[in-house]
Image (spheres, rainbow, N blue to C red):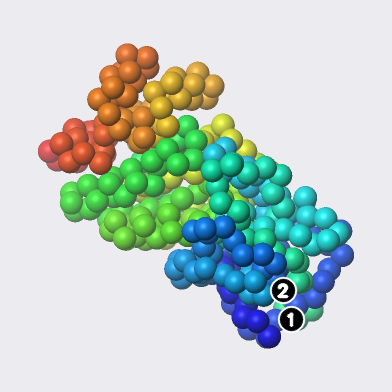
Amino acid sequence: MNRIIHTALSRIATFENYTLKTLPRREWAAGDYVVGEVSKPPGHGVRIELANGRLVRVDVGDRLLGALGTRFATLEATGSWENIGDDGFMQAMTAAGLLGRLTSKSPFLADLTELTYSGHVLVEGRKLIMKACVPPPIPGSAFMPPVVLIVGSSMSAGKTRSAQIIIRRLKTMGLRVLAAKLTGAGRYRDVLSMGDAGADAIFDFVDAGLPSTICSQAEYRAAIGGLLSRMASVAAQVAVIEAGASPLEPYNGDTLIELLAGNIKMLLLCASDPYAVVGIMNAFGKRPDLVAGIACNTDAGITLIKRLAGLPALRLIDRASLPALDAMLQERFGLPT
């Protein structure tokens, strides 16, 4: 029997005494744990993320345990479990084990891991779903910490790197920091990198039982509301929260902003270029407090952002920008200078 590789999306579950069974298509749903067998070597550099965050290369015949879901990435790939046909052909749409059938892929992205459906994970005769693997909400627990919310004009705009830098600065100020990524498509290494930056506690939407946050607004509110109640138990003085993708994509970033409206003390926009800053402001109707990310890689980008949008912009990866960042954080959170 070939090995079964437990992907990052499986990290919230315990897989003991389970069986595999092929279920009729009408019984499938997002968040179901399923196993697929690798049918073709993946492209160069394509890896699978394990439950501990490590990346491994898989071979034909290996079997992946992941979860059904949907992805709609502007720069990489789109697809859904709903596109899987009778042949059971699917792909690992993210390294973390988000399983579905692609509908489009960037020509710059290597071929993703191709799989054939082997069956659903059953425990005591019932299919195992992600939502069944998370603790219940904590009654009466309101999420109170002030928040730095990081949004983007798209994926890969510099949000996670910016979060790491801000976490480090807040830790140098002696604060207890909670970090989270609450929208997007599952990728454990992003939130782990926030822990590496010094966050005292880390969470992401997988901890709420979601394989990605492409779901109904009601489903997202219920899942993230429960997670926020658990996050409230952490004695954090400030929270750094990333919204994956952009608030205009179907990942419920706009819903997250509504949920956190009373907590947001600083809104950081990471943009792919200066024109995207204007696009986000016009389309979403919100004015960020600071712009960072790829659009700020050069003085030319920073100058154009200030001219087009009238917003402060910082190249956070440049240590010369840190005094200005510190001053903004101190002002926003009422910290001594």
Left or right of 301 in this view: 233: right
Relative to 309, say whether 258 is above or below: below
Q: Are marks 1 and 2 in contact (CB under 8 Å)?
A: yes
Q: Secondary structure at mark 1?
A: strand
Q: Is residue 264 left or right of residue 6?
A: left
| Image-based side of 269 in relation to 110, left or right | left
Mark 2, Cα crowd under 10 Å, few <14 / some 14-19 / many 20+, is: many
Residue 313, image x and y in percent? 29, 27
Q: Please name the residue shown 45% across and 35% down the image.
A: 152
- Image: 163 above or below 269: below
> Residue 316 appears at what percent x and percent y?
26, 38
Q: Can you give x and y, in whole percent of width and height, for residue 248 in the image?
A: 56, 31
Q: The C terminus appears in which quarter of the rendering? A: top left
Three-letter residue code for mark 2: Val
Drawn side of residue 81 relative to residue 211, left or right = right
Q: Is 85 above or below relative to 63?
A: above
Camera sees residue 162: yes
The residue wearing badge 1 is 19
Label 2: which secondary element: strand
The foreground one among 335 and 306 is 306
Observer-nearest of 228 and 49: 49
Query: Which quadrant of the figure contains the N terminus?
Result: bottom right
Q: Amino acid at mark 1?
A: Thr
Residue shown at 43%/59% (left/top)? 189
Where does residue 115 sit, x and y in percent of width and height? 70, 64
> Within the image, what quadrant is residue 63 found in?
bottom right
What residue is shown at x 78% (from left), y 55% (from top)?
84
Q: Which residue is mark 2?
A: 121
